[in-house]
């Protein structure tokens, strides 16, 4: 349960950053949610394929809920993949926003 709560807390922190700076979900709700859903689903399919080939194996841990979405696929994996996709989009959009802001600032400083 500790791992799931940690993931939820981290996702919550990212939501707060997103809300403050309007980087992704709070900038364009529907496209962002579609992107997060698609990315998470693609990674879940990838995990299922790796599980079928014996590449990924689940090991019991007292830090996890024990709830399984499928054979060898714990609930926490779905939240981790959502976290991974959301974090990536915030980092990319944050970097792009910072670059745009710096370019605008430089243009304003250099203009007479």
Image (tube, rainbow, N blue to C red):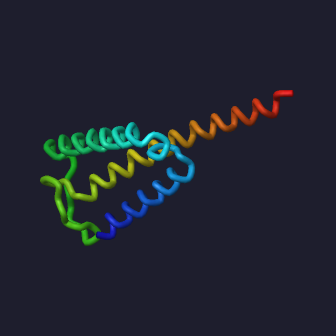
In terms of image quadrants, where is residue 69? bottom left
| Along the line of sight, the residue nearer the viewer: 104 or 5 | 104
Residue in view at x 36 percent, y 43 percent = 33
Q: In the figure, is residue 59 to the left or right of 3?
A: left
Q: In the figure, is residue 91 to the left or right of 49?
A: right
Instruction: Classify 112 as above or below 80.
Output: above
Residue in view at x 22 percent, y 41 percent = 45
Residue in view at x 15 percent, y 42 percent = 53
Q: How many marks?
A: 0
Q: Position of residue 75 (x, y in %)?
A: 23, 58
Q: Residue furthest bottom?
A: 62
* Image quarter in which the C terminus is found: top right
Residue in view at x 27 percent, y 58 percent = 76
Instruction: Classify 80 as above or below 102.
Output: below
Instruction: Classify 63 as above or below 7.
Output: below
* Image quarter in which the N terminus is found: bottom left
Instruction: Classify 80 as above or below 100.
Output: below
In terms of image quadrants, where is residue 89? top left
| Along the line of sight, the residue nearer the viewer: 49 or 41 | 41
Q: Position of residue 65 (x, y in %)?
A: 23, 67
Q: Position of residue 46 (x, y in %)?
A: 24, 40
Q: Residue furthest top?
A: 112
Q: Position of residue 30 (x, y in %)?
A: 38, 40
């Amino acid at each position: 349960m500790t791992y799931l709560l940690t993931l939820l807390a981290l996702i919550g922190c990212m939501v707060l950053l997103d809300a403050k700076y309007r980087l992704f979900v709070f900038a364009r709700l529907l496209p962002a949610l579609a992107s997060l859903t698609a990315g998470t689903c693609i990674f879940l399919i990838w995990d299922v394929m790796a599980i079928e080939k014996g590449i990924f194996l689940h090991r019991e841990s007292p830090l996890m809920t024990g709830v399984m979405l499928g054979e060898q696929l714990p609930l926490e994996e779905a939240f981790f993949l959502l976290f991974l996709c959301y974090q990536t989009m915030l980092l990319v959009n944050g970097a792009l926003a910072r670059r745009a802001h710096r370019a605008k600032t430089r243009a304003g400083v250099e203009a007479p």
